[in-house]
C-alpha cells in the first residue's frame, strides 16, 4: 500500500510526503531465527500481517506537515506485488482532500 499526501508549503510550492506499508505473512524456515518473506519460503508462520479477504482493516497513517499547512490531498493506492517491486498490479485507488480545520 502506498499513501501519498500532496500539499503546498509555506512558499506556495508543491510538496509531498509518502508512506509505504507491506502486508504479507512473515515466516521462518525453522532452521534459523532469520525471517523470510514470501510464500516461496513459508514453512512456519511467525506472524501474519497480510490482508484477509472480505475483512475490513483500519489503519492510521500520520504525516508531518510544515507549520501553516492546514490541508492536503491524500491518495491511497493498494497494489498486489508478485515477486519483485517491478511486478506491481493496482487493485484500488482512493483520493480525498483532508483538512485540519473543522
Image: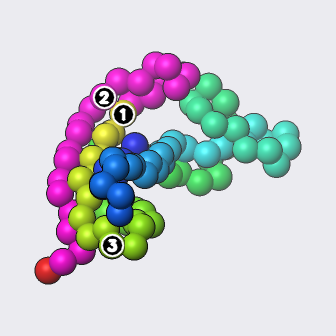
The residue under the point 84% across, 39% down is: 31
Q: CA distance from mark 3 to mark 1?
A: 33 Å
Q: What is the span of residues highlighted in magenta in the rendered image?
A: 80-101
Image quadrant containing the C terminus = bottom left
Q: Residues within 10 Å of mark 1 (few under 14, many from 20)?
A: some
The vertical placement of 69 against 76, above or below, is below
Q: CA distance from mark 1 to mark 2?
A: 4 Å
* Residue 79 percent across, percent down from the top left: 36, 33
C-beta proximity under 8 Å, tags 1 and 2: yes
* Residue 62 percent across, percent down from the top left: 42, 65
Q: Main secondary structure of the magenta part?
A: strand
C-beta proximity under 8 Å, tags 3 and 1: no
Q: Which residue, given by chain and number where applicable, does mark 3 sit on?
A: 68
Image quadrant containing the N terminus = top left
Q: Which residue, given by chain and number where applicable, does mark 2 sit on?
A: 90
Which numbered disc flags the more N-terminal residue, 2 or 3?
3
C-beta proximity under 8 Å, tags 2 and 3: no
Q: Residues within 10 Å of mark 2 (few under 14, many from 20)?
A: few
The vertical placement of 24 against 8, above or below, is above
Instruction: Name the element at disc 3.
Output: loop
The residue under the point 62% across, 25% down is: 40
- Check the image and name the residue furthest to the top: 87
Q: Is residue 29 left or right of residue 99?
A: right
Q: Is residue 93 left or right of residue 52?
A: left
Residue 9 in view: yes
Q: Which residue, given by chain and number where applicable, does mark 1 sit on?
A: 79
Frontmost of labels 2 and 3 is 3
As for residue 92 lying within the magenta part, the answer is: yes
The vertical placement of 94 against 9, above or below, is above
Instruction: Name the element at disc 1.
Output: strand
Q: How many marks?
A: 3
Amino acid at each position: 500500500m502506498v499513501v501519498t499526501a500532496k500539499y503546498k508549503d509555506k512558499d506556495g510550492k508543491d510538496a509531498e510526503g509518502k508512506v509505504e506499508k507491506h502486508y504479507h505473512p512473515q515466516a521462518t524456515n525453522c532452521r534459523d531465527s532469520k525471517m523470510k518473506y514470501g510464500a516461496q519460503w513459508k514453512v512456519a508462520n511467525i506472524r501474519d500481517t497480510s490482508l484477509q479477504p472480505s475483512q475490513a482493516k483500519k489503519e492510521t497513517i500520520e504525516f508531518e506537515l510544515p507549520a501553516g499547512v492546514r490541508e492536503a490531498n491524500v491518495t491511497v493506492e493498494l497494489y498486489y506485488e508478485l515477486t519483485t517491486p517491478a511486478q506491481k498490479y493496482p487493485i484500488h485507488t482512493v483520493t480525498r482532500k483532508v483538512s485540519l480545520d473543522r
